[in-house]
Amino acid sequence: MQQLQHAARALGWDGQLIPDVEVLGAKFAAVVRIRQDVHQWRSRNGWAPELNPAWFRSWSEPTTHDHVPVPAVDLLGALVPVAHPRFALRACGTLLTLAPCAVVLPSNQPYRPLRMLELDYYGVGAVNAAPGGPAELVIPPEDRTAEFGSSLFGRWLLEVLYSRLLELPQLTENA
């Protein structure tokens, strides 16, 4: 977890780290920022995170647009630990459509220009990070979410991350 915190800091992602997120076969850590005004409103009005993905399909119906909750978190980025850069594109895959994605490589990973060029081309970031030490930004990730637009999956993921964030003790102390 400390390695992921160092990586998020190296990327300049100032938010709350949510480790061990697992959705649709993707395993990653998310860095989110709570939208305090929305969180407080949703708390006051009893609008808990909606975790049922079937409920989100109804959001595509125009008659239900006024029943869609405003997201209480912003997804700053996704971190995916990988053992080698050759696994990076597969690891970030779908995540690139939702937020900037960066792979976290072991700090002893040798620099391979062609592999890093491929990551840079697709907008995948790379960070070398040791478990106990500082992280080094190798390639900054690109935010390509505008190219893909919003999706019901992405909106559902924000609800999942909001739910996970509510489980953290720091949030309940500050709410």
Image (tube, grey):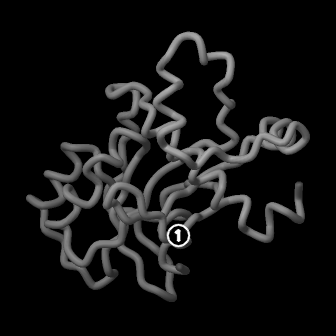
Name the amino acid type tagged 1.
Pro
| 22 to 46, vertically: above or below | below
User: Where is residue 156 drawn, in percent x and y?
Assistant: 51, 42
Q: Quadrant of residue 108?
A: bottom left
Point 45% across, 33% down: residue: 152
User: Compared with residue 91, is residue 55 higher up or lower down, i.e. above or below?
Assistant: above
Residue at the image position 34 percent from the left and 39 percent from the top = 97
Viewer-proximal residue among 148 and 61: 61
Placement of 86 over or under 75, stated as above or below: below
Image point (65%, 36%), residue name:
71
Closer to us: 116 or 167: 167
Where residue 151 appears, x then y in whole percent? 42, 30
Q: Which residue is mark 1?
A: 19
Q: Residue furthest top?
A: 62
Local SS, label 1: strand
Quadrant for the C terminus, please: bottom right
Q: Is residue 168 left or right of residue 90?
A: right
Q: Quadrant of residue 84?
A: bottom left
Which residue is rendered at x = 53% and y = 79% of the image?
Answer: 1
Q: Number of marks in the image?
A: 1
- In the displayed orientation, state which residue is furthest to the left: 114
